[in-house]
């Protein structure tokens, strides 16, 4: 009887997984067909000398759709897809945290993701219990962090007071971990600060999980990062460079430059992930699995 119940449960799990993979495959096939149709229309217009501007726009949109769906196809077999814990550190107080985090929070809301943020040094209270001796404070909502950033902006400051520029970000939801893990490393925003400087943000993968038992919160791998001015990543090569001119996005790790306006970055994040994944496919020496092994899981992430 017990074996029969287990077999039924296994069949239910397999059926659910089969349905999920079918959905991913059908979406990718639909995007491929739309791209082929758009290309055929564009070629036909060129051959008969018709105006191609509108057709080319459709072809470009179809290409974006294909690259978006290709990310999900390439990630379909990843087991740890839906949860992640990241440590963020602003390398210099010029606004890099706000440029990355605030649009990401908006995108997370649109995607139906659950987000918890933790500020270093904060403590719990009688109404808000929180373990003692944990370097991070209790979880904060996206709205709370938006309010703090707004208040800092009114004071003329690029971000709230964060110890050594640290913030802990936990996210769960469909594909959240699989997409956000490729954000590891230094992000450079060319000439985006008020003084004309180039803000930097460092993203470290702590774990491909959302929940952490109390004892894990005291582990060194989950601790806030030290002063960025004394860190190696502050001097490291950016994995993302958002160019000020021509909407240029340089992906150093993938060896690719995309045309992608900063304000569209999170709406088209799948295209960025596809570029990273295709670089892994081209280079057999590149360890794709490292993107999914955080510091708390015995890995070192992929930060360069």
Image: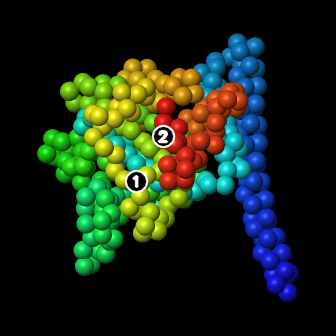
Tell me where residue 10 appears, x and y as whole percent. Answer: 79, 71
Disc sitting over residue 184 in the figure: 2
202 or 99, nearer to the observer:
202
Mark nearer the N terminus (1 vs 2): 2
Count neighbours of disc 1 (C-alpha within 10 A) and say few if under 14, some if 14 to 19, many if 20 or more: few
Residue 147 found in image quarter: bottom left
Within 10 angstroms of label 2, few (less than 14), some, or many (20 or more) residues?
A: many
| In this rendering, position of residue 110 left or right of residue 40 | left
Q: Is residue 35 left or right of residue 251?
A: right
In this rendering, does residue 22 appear at all? yes
Q: Which scheme is used to colour this image of the protein?
A: rainbow
Give above or below for 4 relative to 31.
below
Q: Quadrant of the N terminus?
A: bottom right
Q: Nearer the viewer, residue 293 or 126?
A: 293
Picture mark count: 2
Residue that carries the numbered disc 1 in the rendered image: 220
Provide residue 166's location: percent of width, then percent of height: 31, 48
Seen in the picture, residue 242 relative to 296 is either above or below; the reply is: above
**Residue 302 place in picture, x, y as percent:** 53, 38
Image spot of residue 188 (x, y percent) = 38, 30
The residue closer to the viewer here, 283 or 199, is 283
In the image, what residue occupies the spot 26% across and 25% down?
Answer: 197
Q: Nearer the viewer, mark 1 or mark 2?
A: 1
Residue 136 position by quadrant: bottom left
One can see residue 278 in this view:
no
Tell me whether the residue at label 1 lies in contact with that at label 2, contact meaning CB atoms closer than 8 angstroms.
Answer: no
Query: How much space separates mark 1 and mark 2, taking CA atoms?
Result: 18 Å
């Amino acid at each position: 009887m017990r074996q029969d119940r287990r077999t039924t449960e296994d069949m239910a799990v397999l059926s659910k997984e089969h349905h999920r993979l079918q959905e991913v495959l059908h979406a990718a096939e639909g995007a491929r067909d739309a791209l082929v149709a758009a290309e055929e229309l564009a070629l036909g217009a060129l051959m008969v000398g018709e105006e191609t501007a509108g057709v080319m726009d459709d072809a470009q949109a179809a290409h974006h759709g294909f690259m978006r769906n290709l990310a999900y196809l390439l990630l379909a077999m990843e087991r740890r897809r839906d949860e992640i814990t990241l440590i963020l550190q602003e390398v210099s107080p010029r606004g890099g945290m706000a440029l990355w985090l605030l649009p990401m929070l908006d995108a997370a809301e649109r995607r139906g993701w659950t987000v918890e943020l933790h500020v270093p040094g904060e403590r719990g209270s009688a109404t808000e219990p929180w373990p003692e001796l944990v370097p991070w404070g209790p979880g904060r909502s996206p709205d709370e962090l938006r309010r703090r950033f707004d208040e800092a902006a009114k004071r003329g400051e690029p971000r709230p007071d964060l110890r050594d520029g640290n913030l802990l970000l936990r996210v769960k939801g469909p594909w959240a971990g699989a997409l956000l893990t490729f954000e590891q490393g230094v992000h450079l925003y060319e000439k985006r600060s008020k003084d004309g400087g180039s803000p930097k943000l460092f993203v470290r993968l702590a774990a491909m999980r959302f929940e952490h038992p109390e004892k894990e919160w005291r582990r060194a791998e989950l601790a806030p990062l030290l002063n960025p001015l004394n860190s190696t990543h502050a001097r490291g090569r950016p994995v993302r460079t958002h160019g000020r001119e021509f909407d240029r996005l340089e992906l150093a790790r993938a060896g690719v430059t995309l045309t992608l306006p900063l304000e569209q970055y999170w709406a088209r994040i799948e295209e960025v992930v596809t570029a990273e994944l295709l670089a892994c496919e081209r280079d057999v020496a590149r360890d794709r699995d490292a993107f999914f092994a955080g510091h708390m899981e015995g890995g070192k992430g992929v930060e360069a």
